Amino acid sequence: MGKGGDFSQIHVLVLPLLTQGHINPVLQFAKRLASKGLQVSLITFCGNKSLEIRDNSSVKLEPVFDDLGADSVMEKSIDDYLDRLEAVVTFRLPQIIDKLGMSKSENTASCLVYDSALPWALDIAKQQGVYGAEFFTFSCAVSTIYYNLHEGLLKVPIVEPCTFMAGLPLLRPHDLPSFISDIGAYPTLTHLLTNQFSSFKKADWVFFNTFTSLENEVINWMAYQRPIKTIGPTVPSKYLENRVDDDDDYGVHLFKPEIDICANWLNSKKTGSVVYVSFESLAAPGEDQMEELAMGLKRSGRNFLWVVRESEQKKIPANFIEETSEKGLVVSWSPQLEVLGHKAVGCFMSHCGWNSMMEALSLGVPMVAPPHWTDQTTNAKFIADVWRVGIRAEIDGEGIIGKEEIERCIREVMDGDQSEEMKRNAMNWKKSATDAVSEGGSSENNIIEFIAQLTCNNHISKPQA
Ligand code: UDP
C-alpha cells in the first residue's frame, strides 16, 4: 500500500518512444508512481528483440513485438519507423488495455501516459475509456519554442538577429533548436516536435520533465496556456532524495555499459581531476570532429573518460588510445550516473541532451557544452547564460569545434576565472533538484496531486469507452 491510501486499483500504462533519452525519464516517472502503490506497466515497441530491463523493477513490461520487421523498417528511415510504430501500437494498445482490465470497471481509475512524440495515442486511450496524460521529455523552454511555432506565434524562417518569446531570454538563431533555426533540414523531426501540441489541450494531464525553480518563468507562461505538472528531475532517487526503494539506476540500457572498467579507472584518479566526455546516443559526429575532439582532449593535459559507441570507434585517430593511455580511457558506453556521481569527475563535456543536462545539474557537475543539433543548442544557452554552470564550445567557420576551442573550454571549466562560481552554481542546482522531489517539493506535490485527482475521479469526467 502506498503512503496515503490503497492505490492498487489504479493502473497507469506508460508509452515512451524507444530511445535512451525518452525511455529513461518515462520509466523513472513510472517508478515514482509505482513507489506510491499504483500498478504501473510500460509498453516497449522493440521490433523482434526484447528489451533488457532490470528484473527487480516495480514496473511491469508490456513488450510489443513487431514480427513484420520493425528492425528492418528502423534501418530504412525515421518516417517508416514512426508510421510502423503508430500502426502496430494502434492495433495492440486496445488489446493491452483490455488485458490489464483498465477500462472495465466504473470504480477503477486508469490512465495512459504517452510520450508527447506520440500524440495520436490520446484518441486510443479515450476510445477505450481510459484517461490520457501527455509526457514531454524536453525542457519546458524548448517545448515552449515548439508551441510558439505550432500556434503560429513564431515565424520561420528566422530572419531576426534575436527572437523574443514570453517567458524566455532573448535567443539568437544559434540558441534556437536547430530544427527551427535550420528549418527544412529535418522536416520529419520538425513535424514530430511541432505536432506534440496537437493533443496538448485535449489531454487530461500534461507532465514536463523539469522542476519549477529551474525554469520558473517559462513554466508559469506554459501553465497559463493550460494546467501542467512538472515532475522532474527524473534521475534515479538514489542520486537525489533517496526515498524510492531500489531506485539506483535507470535499469534499461540500450547499450551495454562498461561498469567495472569505468569504476576501477575512476578510483585511481584524484578528486575533481577527470573530464567525462559523452556525446549523444543517436547521432554520429564526422571524422574531422572526432579528430579535433581527440586532439583537444590531449592538449588539455587532463584525465579524460570518453564514451565512443562501438560503431563510432573507427573514427578515433590512429594511435590516439595508445598515446594517451596514461591520461585517458575510452569506453563504448558508460554507467553515466555512477560516473557523474564519482568524486574524480570535475567536468562533464556533453552534447547537452536534456537527460544528460538534468543528470549533471542533479549531481552538481559543471559542464562544457558543445551542442550538435535539435534541442541541444537551446540547452547550451541555458547552461552558459541562465544557470551559469558551464560554457558553450563554439563552432568555427567550417562548422566544427576545433581542438583549441575544446582545450580552452576544458581549462576554463576546470580552473579558469569563473570555475569556482560554476562549481558553486552547480552545487546549488543539485540542492534545488533534490528539494523538488523531496517531501513537500514542487514535483513531489504534483505527483501526489495527480494521483489524488485520478483516484477521486473528480478531475474530469471519465471517458466513455
Ligand atoms: N547514457 C548512458 N551512458 C553513456 C551515455 C549516455 O547511460 O555512456 C545515458 C544518459 O545517462 C542519459 C541518456 O543516455 O540518460 C541520454 O539521454 P540524453 O537526453 O542526454 O541524450 P540523447 O542521447 O537522447 O540525445
Image (spheres, rainbow, N blue to C red):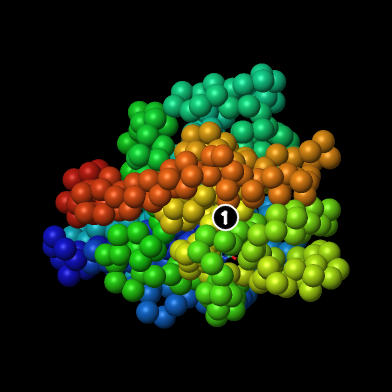
What residue occupies the far right of the structure in this picture?
318
Compared to residue 139, the image places residue 437 above or below, namely below
Please tell me which residue is depicted at 25% across the width and 48% down the height of the picture.
Answer: 441
Q: Is residue 140 visible?
A: yes
* Quarter holding residue 192: top right
Q: Which residue type does callout 1 highlight?
A: Phe
Residue 332 placed where, x, y %?
A: 67, 71
Which residue is tagged 1? 348
Task: Inspect this view and state whether residue 282 appears.
Answer: no
Closer to the camera, 255 or 413?
A: 413
Image quarter in which the N terminus is found? bottom left
Compare residues 102 and 77 and report the one nearer the observer: 77
Q: Is mark 1 within 8 Å of ligand 1?
A: no
Residue 414 left/right relative to 4:
right
Q: Is residue 312 left or right of residue 417?
A: right
Q: Name which quarter of the figure residue 30 lies in.
A: bottom left
Alpha-carbon neighbours of circle 1 within 10 Å: few (<14), some, or many (≥20)?
many
Q: Is residue 222 above or below residue 364?
A: above
Q: Residue furthest top?
A: 160
Q: Nearer the viewer, residue 391 or 210?
A: 391
Q: Secondary structure at mark 1?
A: strand
Which residue does the image show at 39% across and 30% down from the upper left?
217
Residue 172 pos. (x, y %): 63, 27
Q: Is residue 82 left or right of residue 336?
A: right
Which residue sits at x=73%, y=44%?
405
The answer to whether residue 278 is left or right of residue 407 is: left
Image quarter for ligand 1 equals bottom right
Q: Residue at x 52, y 49 (%)?
A: 366
How many dots with numbers? Answer: 1
